[in-house]
Amino acid sequence: MNKSIAIICGGGPAPGINTVISTLAKTFLKDDYDVLGVHHGYKGILSDNPSIRIFDYQSADRIFSLGGSVLTMSRFKPKDSDFKADFFVKNNVKLLVTIGGDDTASTAGRLTKYLSNQNLEVAHIHV
């Protein structure tokens, strides 16, 4: 199974989100990662049936100049008791990329700490 990265968008819309997603996807695809865009932010990635957009180079390139976000955003801020590792294990996620504000960043820190306590090493980048 390939290693993958998961990209989520928390909070509200902001300029440049698709450019960030496109650039990340194309960069990691070159290194043979699967790139998974997860709709609905943390609500999506922690759900039992997440809605996922799988990026290839062409689909990532097409969104570079589009406004808005191709990934549905969510302001959901999970509690620690909401965390689970299922998505990360099932998809061999090695990197979580979060796009959003301070709450999105701090939640990613709590989530990756939880995953580490579950013996899953998932790195985190926040934009």
Image (cartoon, helix red, strand yellow):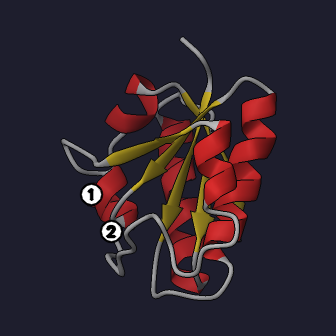
Mark carried by residue 119: none
Circle 1: is it few (<14), some (14-19), or many (20+) Cα within 10 Å? few
In this orientation, does residue 118 appear? yes
> Which residue, as the protein is rendered here, is positioned at the far left?
48
> How far across and how far down the image is residue 124, in percent?
67, 52
Tell me where residue 78 appears, x and y as whole percent: 33, 68
Mark pair 2, 1: CA separation: 6 Å
Quadrant of the snapshot with the C terminus: bottom right
Q: Is residue 96 visible?
A: no
Give neighbour class at mark 2: few <14, some 14-19, many 20+ (Cα, 10 Å).
some
The residue nearer to you, when weighing 116 against 5, is: 5
Looking at the image, is 30 positioned above or below residue 53? above
Residue 82 numbered mark, or none = 1
Question: Looking at the picture, which amino acid does disc 2 mark?
Answer: Pro
15 in relation to 54, above or below: below
Circles 2 and 1, Cβ within 8 Å, touching? The answer is yes
Give the amino acid at mark 1. Answer: Asp
Badge 1 marks a residue whose secondary structure is helix
Q: Which mark is residue 78?
A: 2
The relative height of residue 52 versus residue 127 in the rendered view (above or below) is above
